[in-house]
């Protein structure tokens, strides 16, 4: 039986893929598999992955004939995974040697549905450790209890899929798949669903994922229309949370987070192409009007004056036809 399936999407990362693959080799075990999903790369990535399939123990190479984005590539890997546990890595990130055996040991010793870990953010030569915003470590907790409070960073704000490991039963329950076709913020509906519907989780003091920021080809660095998928992602969070039995308690957190993300994008609007910047404003205005208005009023009242004023002004802005997400 395969113990761990590692799903690694790649798209035009020939500069970084060799480092990623070397770090996987340093984590290989006879009961681990590495599902390398090439999302229709147009550079030298396919050749690198074809070679890795021959040389990396446990490697499985899958190629998309059309580019589908990170969420779709991850889903392809999930559908191919045979492991008792599933985890993720992005094709431009890397791991500390021996990290995955420690990760499996941690989740098996705790016996919970999923485990969350800290990570190292790497921007050029700078290294910053980011911690899971969960105070109690190595203790099995109810993930629903880790969603709130609304006014503080919590576990649902730490949306990195690769910062953890997930039991096969969550795959069977449909809680590990992503929303197909989302080009950005694909982790947001995913992490909310996981916390609303999984039965147990834990945060552990295990540091082994190195997350590369500032990559020129990364979607977070590109100001094109794909960035606006965050609206579709958060609309899904709001819609699904509104149907939850505890919607009254959970919606303020979802709405406040959505507002914070809109404000963040508006604050760096100069990085968007002019037509996309205009669309960002109109789609954000429509999104604000779609939110539960009483919950939105409370969220804006609790935010700092500058952000709240900007969002209230945007909310009043007439949205042109066809501007909805």
Image (tube, rainbow, N blue to C red):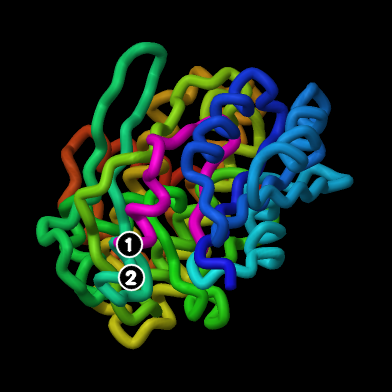
Residue ID for mark 2: 108
The correct choice, above or below, for 257 with respect to 24 in the image is below
Give the magenta part as a residue range: 86-105
Give the residue furthest to the bottom. 245
Determine the residue positioned at 68% across, 46% down: 36
Q: Give left or right: position of 35 versus 265.
A: right
Give the residue furthest to the left. 136
Assign the N terminus to one quadrant of the image: bottom right
Give the residue furthest to the top. 125
Q: Element type at marker 1?
A: helix
Determine the residue positioned at 59% across, 34% down: 21
Q: Element type at marker 2?
A: helix
Q: Give left or right: position of 116 versus 281.
A: left
Q: Residue 179 is drawn in which quadrant? A: bottom right
Q: Residue 322, can we see it? A: no
- Camera-nearest residue between 109 and 177: 109
Determine the residue positioned at 56% across, 56% down: 30
How many other residues sit within 10 Å of disc 2, few (<14), some (14-19) or many (≥20)? some
Residue 188's x, y, as percent?
45, 55
Residue 6's x, y, as percent?
56, 53
Determine the residue positioned at 88% across, 46% down: 65
- Camera-nearest residue between 106 and 154: 106
- Camera-nearest residue between 46 and 277: 46
Residue ID for mark 1: 105
Residue 72's x, y, as percent?
69, 54
- CB atoms of marks 1 and 2 within 8 Å: yes
């Amino acid at each position: 039986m395969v113990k761990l399936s590692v799903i690694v999407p790649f798209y035009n990362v020939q500069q970084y893929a060799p480092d990623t693959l070397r770090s996987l080799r340093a984590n290989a075990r006879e009961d681990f598999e590495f599902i390398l999903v090439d999302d229709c790369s147009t550079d030298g990535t396919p050749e690198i992955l074809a070679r890795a399939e021959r040389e990396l123990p446990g490697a499985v190479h899958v190629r998309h004939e059309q580019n589908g984005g990170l969420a779709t590539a991850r889903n392809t890997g999930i559908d191919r995974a045979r492991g008792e546990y599933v985890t993720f890595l992005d094709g431009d990130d890397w791991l500390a040697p021996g990290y995955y055996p420690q990760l499996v040991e941690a989740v098996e010793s705790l016996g919970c549905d999923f485990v969350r870990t800290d990570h190292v953010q790497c921007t050029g030569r700078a290294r910053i450790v980011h911690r899971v915003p969960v105070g109690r470590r190595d203790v099995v907790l109810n993930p629903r209890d880790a969603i709130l409070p609304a006014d503080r960073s919590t576990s649902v704000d730490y949306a990195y899929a690769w910062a953890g490991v997930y039991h096969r039963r969550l795959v069977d329950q449909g809680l590990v798949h992503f929303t197909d076709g989302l080009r950005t913020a694909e982790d947001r509906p995913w992490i909310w669903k996981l916390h609303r519907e999984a039965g147990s989780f834990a945060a552990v003091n295990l540091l082994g994922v190195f997350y590369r920021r500032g990559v020129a080809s990364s979607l977070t660095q590109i100001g094109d229309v794909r960035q606006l998928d965050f609206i579709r992602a958060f609309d899904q969070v709001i819609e699904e949370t509104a149907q939850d039995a505890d919607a009254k308690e959970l919606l303020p957190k979802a709405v406040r987070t959505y507002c914070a993300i809109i404000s963040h994008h508006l604050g760096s609007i100069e990085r968007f192409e002019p037509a996309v910047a205009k669309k960002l404003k109109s789609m954000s205005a429509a999104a604000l009007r779609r939110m539960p208005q009483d919950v939105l009023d409370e969220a804006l009242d609790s935010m700092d004056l500058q952000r709240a004023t900007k969002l209230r002004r945007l909310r009043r802005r007439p949205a042109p036809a066809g501007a909805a997400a």
